[in-house]
C-alpha cells in the first residue's frame, strides 16, 4: 500500500509549469520577490550577483562565489534556477531572465506601478478589527475544517468549496457531507504544522482551479501577493481581477483572509496569509506565534498522562483529540471525560506506516502532557520515548536507493574520472574503488551516461 | 566501456543482509550483486516482496505485551 506523497512545496509546483506561464508570472514584482524568498540561499546569492548587472556573466565567474567542496550545492542551485527559467544560458555566459530581473528590481527599489503588493484602503473602516480578532478568526475557520475532517459534531459544516477541495485532494472520501470520511492521507495531513497544511490545500486548490478554467497565473499572483501583505492592515478590492475576487470567497472559507460581509469592499489578511512565503525559520516562529496566541488555553488543556508501562490516559472528550491519539495509541476504554489505552509495537508501527514519524508522536505527547506530568523531569518516561524511537529504527532496517550499478571499467584512470564526476554531481550512493564499482542514484544516471558517452567519443 | 545495471541499492545490517540472501537462495531472483557486508543490489520489482518477508520474519521474534494483557483479562 503506498501513501500518496503531498507536494507540499510550492517550488515543485512552479518547476512543473511551462516557460510561458512562468514568464507571465514574473510580470508581477510581488511574485518575483516571493519566488526569490522561496529559493535556497546559494540560488539567491547568484541572483543578487546578476540582478544589477546588465551584461551576462561568464558561467565560470560563479565558481568564485562557491567554496571548494560545495559544488553539489552549486549544481543544485543552478538546476533550480534553470527549472524555474530564471536564468538564460548561452555560450558559457549566464544572465537573468529579463522579465524576472525587471520585476525583482522593481520590488526591491519600490518602482512598482502594477499594485502587485496590494492597495491599502485609504478610508477608515467603521468596523475595524484588530490582530487578536484576526488570529482568532483564522484559528476558528481552520479548526472548523480540521474538526470536520475527524468528524467532530460541531453542528457546523464547512462550505461546499472546502468540501470539494477536501475530496479532490484525497484527504476525505464520500459524496455528501454526512457520509464523508477521512482517509489515511488525511490523518497524515492532521499531524503537519499549520503552514504545511495550508500549502497542501492551496496547491490542491491550484490544481482544481485549472479544471475550473481559472487562470493559474492570476491565482498564483494573488497567493504571492497575500504573502507580502501586512497583518492588521485592510486592503481594497479595487485592484483585484474577477478571478481573484472569486478566490477571495474561497480563501475566506479557509480563514486565510477576513471580510466582514461578502459584499464588503475591503479585506484583511490573517496570519495564515502573511506567513505563506516566509522562509523556514520565520515559518516556525510564525506558527509558534500562532501557537502562543492559543498557548494560554493550551497549557490548561494539557490532558495526556503517559506511564512507564506504556499506558496512556487522556482526559478529553474532544473527538478531534481522540482521533489524533487513535493514530498511534491502542485505545481500550472510553469514559465520560477520559480515554485509556496503551502504546504498543503494533499501534506505533501502524502510525509509522501511515507516514507519521516517531518524533511527531513524541512532540505530540510532550506538548499535550497533563499538568501532573510536568512535575517530573524528564517530562516523558525515557523508556517509552526510547522504545518509540527503536520501533522506528526497526522499520528502517533497510536503506533503499534506486539507481544504477556501474562496473567493468577498463582502467583505473577511467574509473577515477567518472567516479570523480559522480562525486561532483553529488549522486554517488556507494563506491568501492578497489573493485572498480560504484552506484549512482536514478536522478543522476542520465548525466553520468552522457558524460561517459562524451568521454568515449572524445577519446576515440 | 563500463557497464551499468539498473537496480536498488540496499544498505542494512549484516543480519538483515543474511535474511535477504536467504530469500534469494530459493529462486535466485532477488539479488543482483552482493557488494559488501552491508550493501547489496536487488531487483527493483522485488523490493516490496523483500520488505514484506523481512517484516513477517522479524515479527515472529517479537514479544507482544498488549495481547498478553488481553488474554489475562479473559
Image (cartoon, rainbow, N blue to C red):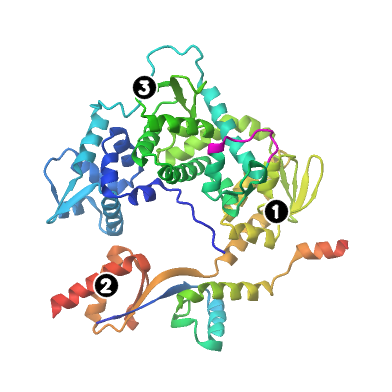
Q: For numbered disc 3, what is the local secondary structure?
A: loop
Q: Which comes sooner in the sequence, label 3 or label 2?
A: 3
Q: Which residue is mark 3?
A: A238
Q: Residues within 10 Å of mark 3 (few under 14, many from 20)?
A: few
Nearer to the camera, B72 or A179:
A179
Residue lying at 57% horizontally and 55% vertically, measured from the top left: A357
Segment tinted magenta in the rendering: A152-161
Nearer to the camera, A253 or A426:
A253
Q: Which residue is mark 2?
A: A449
Q: Which mark is residue A10?
A: none
Give how far across and how far down residue A140 sits, in percent: 59, 31
Q: Is residue A381 magenta?
A: no
Q: Is residue A157 magenta?
A: yes
Reply above or below: A125 against A114.
Answer: above
Q: Which comes sooner in the sequence, label 1 or label 3?
A: 3
Which quadrant of the view contains residue A33? Answer: top left
Magenta highlight: main SS = loop
Residue lying at 53% horizontally and 37% vertically, measured from the top left: A161
Give how far across and how far down residue A401 sits, in percent: 43, 69
- Of the two numbered discs 1 and 2 in the rendering, the one whose residue sits closer to the viewer: 2
Q: Which residue is mark 1?
A: A329
Q: For numbered disc 1, what is the local secondary structure?
A: loop
Nearer to the camera, A254 or A189:
A254
Give how far across and how far down residue A335 sits, in percent: 82, 44
Amino acid at each position: 500500500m503506498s501513501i500518496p506523497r503531498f507536494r507540499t512545496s510550492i517550488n515543485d509546483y512552479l518547476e512543473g509549469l511551462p516557460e510561458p506561464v512562468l514568464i507571465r508570472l514574473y510580470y508581477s514584482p510581488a511574485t518575483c520577490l516571493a519566488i526569490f524568498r522561496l529559493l535556497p540561499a546559494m540560488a539567491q546569492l547568484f541572483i543578487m550577483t546578476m540582478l544589477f548587472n546588465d551584461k551576462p556573466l561568464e558561467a565560470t565567474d560563479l565558481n568564485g562565489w562557491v567554496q571548494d567542496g560545495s559544488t553539489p550545492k552549486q549544481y543544485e542551485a543552478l538546476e533550480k534556477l534553470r527549472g524555474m527559467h530564471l536564468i538564460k544560458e548561452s555560450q558559457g555566459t549566464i544572465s537573468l531572465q529579463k522579465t524576472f530581473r525587471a520585476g525583482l528590481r522593481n520590488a526591491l527599489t519600490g518602482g512598482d506601478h502594477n499594485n502587485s503588493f496590494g492597495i491599502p484602503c485609504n478610508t477608515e473602516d467603521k468596523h475595524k478589527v484588530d490582530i487578536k480578532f484576526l488570529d482568532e478568526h483564522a484559528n476558528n475557520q481552520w479548526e472548523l475544517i480540521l474538526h470536520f475532517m475527524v468528524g467532530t459534531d460541531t453542528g457546523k459544516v464547512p462550505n461546499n468549496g472546502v468540501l470539494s477541495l477536501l475530496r479532490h485532494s484525497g484527504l476525505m472520501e464520500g459524496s455528501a457531507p454526512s457520509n464523508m470520511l477521512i482517509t489515511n492521507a488525511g490523518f497524515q495531513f492532521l499531524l503537519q504544522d499549520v503552514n504545511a497544511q495550508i500549502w497542501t490545500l492551496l496547491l490542491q486548490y491550484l490544481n482544481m482551479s485549472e479544471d475550473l478554467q481559472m487562470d493559474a497565473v492570476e491565482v498564483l499572483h494573488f497567493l504571492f501577493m497575500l504573502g507580502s501583505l501586512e497583518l492588521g492592515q485592510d486592503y481594497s478590492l479595487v485592484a483585484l481581477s474577477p478571478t481573484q475576487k472569486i478566490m477571495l470567497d474561497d480563501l475566506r472559507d479557509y480563514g486565510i483572509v477576513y471580510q466582514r460581509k461578502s459584499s464588503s469592499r475591503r479585506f484583511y489578511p490573517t496570519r495564515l496569509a502573511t506567513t505563506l512565503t516566509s522562509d523556514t525559520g520565520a515559518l516556525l516562529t510564525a506558527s509558534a506565534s500562532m501557537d502562543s496566541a492559543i498557548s494560554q488555553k493550551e497549557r490548561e488543556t494539557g490532558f495526556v498522562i503517559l506511564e512507564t508501562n506504556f499506558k496512556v490516559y487522556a482526559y478529553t472528550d474532544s473527538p478531534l483529540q481522540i482521533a489524533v491519539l487513535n493514530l498511534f495509541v491502542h485505545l481500550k476504554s472510553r469514559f465520560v471525560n477520559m480515554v485509556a489505552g496503551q502504546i504498543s509495537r503494533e499501534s506505533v508501527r501502524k502510525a509509522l506506516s501511515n507516514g507519521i514519524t516517531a518524533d511527531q508522536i513524541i512532540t505530540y505527547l510532550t506538548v499535550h502532557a497533563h499538568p501532573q506530568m510536568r512535575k517530573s523531569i524528564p517530562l516523558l518516561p525515557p523508556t517509552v520515548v526510547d522504545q518509540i524511537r527503536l520501533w522506528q529504527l526497526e522499520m528502517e532496517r533497510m536503506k533503499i536507493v534506486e539507481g544504477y550499478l556501474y562496473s567493468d571499467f577498463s582502467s583505473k584512470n577511467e574509473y577515477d574520472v567518472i567516479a570523480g564526476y559522480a562525486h561532483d554531481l553529488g549522486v554517488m550512493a556507494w563506491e568501492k574503488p578497489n573493485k572498480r564499482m560504484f552506484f549512482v542514484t536514478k536522478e543522476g544516471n542520465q548525466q553520468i551516461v552522457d558524460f561517459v558517452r562524451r568521454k568515449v567519443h572524445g577519446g576515440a | 566501456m563500463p557497464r551499468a545495471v539498473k537496480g536498488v541499492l540496499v544498505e542494512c545490517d549484516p543480519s538483515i543482509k543474511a535474511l535477504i540472501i536467504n530469500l534469494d537462495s530459493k529462486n535466485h531472483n532477488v539479488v543482483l550483486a552482493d557488494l559488501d557486508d552491508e550493501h547489496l543490489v536487488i531487483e527493483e520489482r522485488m523490493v516490496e516482496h523483500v520488505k514484506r518477508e523481512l517484516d513477517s520474519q522479524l515479527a515472529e521474534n517479537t514479544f507482544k505485551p498488549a495481547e498478553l494483557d488481553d488474554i489475562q483479562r479473559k
